[in-house]
Image (cartoon, rainbow, N blue to C red):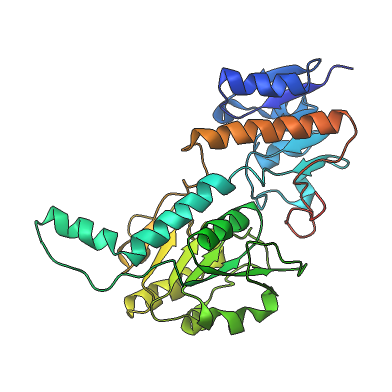
Amino acid sequence: MQEKILVTIDFTEEQKEILEQAAPNAQFEYVLPKQVTEKMVHGADIIVGNPKPEFLKGAQHLKLLQLQSAGANQYSRDCIPEGCVFACATGTYGLAISEYMVACVLQIFNHLNQYHDNQKTGTWKRVGHAKSIFGSTALIVGLGDIGGEFAKRIKALGGYTIGVRRTDLSKPEYLDEIHLTDELDRLLPRADIVALSLPSTPQTYHIIDAQRLSLMKEDAVLVNVGRGNAIDTDALCETLSSGKLLGAALDVTDPEPLPPEHPLWSARGAHITPHMSGGGTLPETQNRLARHCASNIKAFLEGKPLKSVVDLETGYRKLDS
């Protein structure tokens, strides 16, 4: 039987070829996200991309849903057809996002935004003391591909790395320490950098709230690249406005998109980007995504284990995939 594979990602011809080599006997249909219809979804055996969740109900032929995103929180257990293998794209975005995170930390540590503002007014003036990643302590909350790649880069620049995860205390070589999430309150006061790369789950909702913001160093930097609701936005606005924290680099916000009138835009020390760090802004990211999807399609068709299979109970990637 010829598998029907619906691809809703704007891949290049070279990237499409990578997919087609993984399933040479399949029938591929490439459609831009805004052009995807419910009928297309219902007719597919395999989908590569992020279709509307409501389209999945009644998709009785669907055997594999391979997301283009690392996060899977918009898809509930109820909308995934029974028997469908559900995989995300964890492992694709670590390069781009970890480099973005390092850039943000260096920008804030060296007051580059303030210097840019001074440049616009022709002001020749030094802005306080700089900080260095060398000798700093980074607390990395969430140790998937993104958190792990960030930890490697901080370690390479001479930082001390502390990792936090839900389960599994096995320590990779790029971490100096590894702890479970229930130790977060004890670890926050030690950190010069607090980096979040978490999915949106009931357990991660407002994991950084007013109380935990109060535990952070006065000149710490907070970085969030996972999901915006990991941080209590109102509490963060109050914290920044009070003069605490050197800065907060946010590629994700709650709400998102952030309304133009929202106080977070003008909060002292806030550095905001529109959820772009892992998107198609780096060509290599799209190449990695194509290879990841192709690998999973090939494994699925051959009856082999897939990478980055999502546990619908927790919303996290299964640790054995």
Give the side of residue 1 with respect to residue 247, left or right: right
Say which of 39 and 239 sits in front: 239
Q: Quadrant of residue 39?
A: top right
Q: Position of residue 113 (x, y in %)?
A: 27, 59
Residue at point 80%, 58% (across, down): 313
Q: Position of residue 112 (x, y in %)?
A: 28, 59
Q: Is residue 291 above or below residue 240?
A: above
Say which of 131 and 191 sits in front: 131
Q: Quadrant of residue 102?
A: bottom left
Q: Position of residue 283 (x, y in %)?
A: 50, 33
Q: Quadrant of the N terminus?
A: top right
> What number of labels is visible?
0
Residue at point 52%, 50% (across, down): 97
Q: Is residue 61 above or below residue 317?
A: above
Can residue 226 be seen here? The reply is no
Residue at point 53%, 76% (across, down): 209
Q: Position of residue 49 (x, y in %)?
A: 65, 34
Can residue 298 be seen here? The reply is yes
Q: Is residue 148 above or below residue 269?
A: above
Give the side of residue 157 with respect to residue 287, left or right: left
Q: Quadrant of residue 85?
A: top right
Say which of 14 and 242 sits in front: 14
Give the side of residue 121 with respect to residue 233, left or right: left
Give the side of residue 32 with respect to residue 320, left or right: left
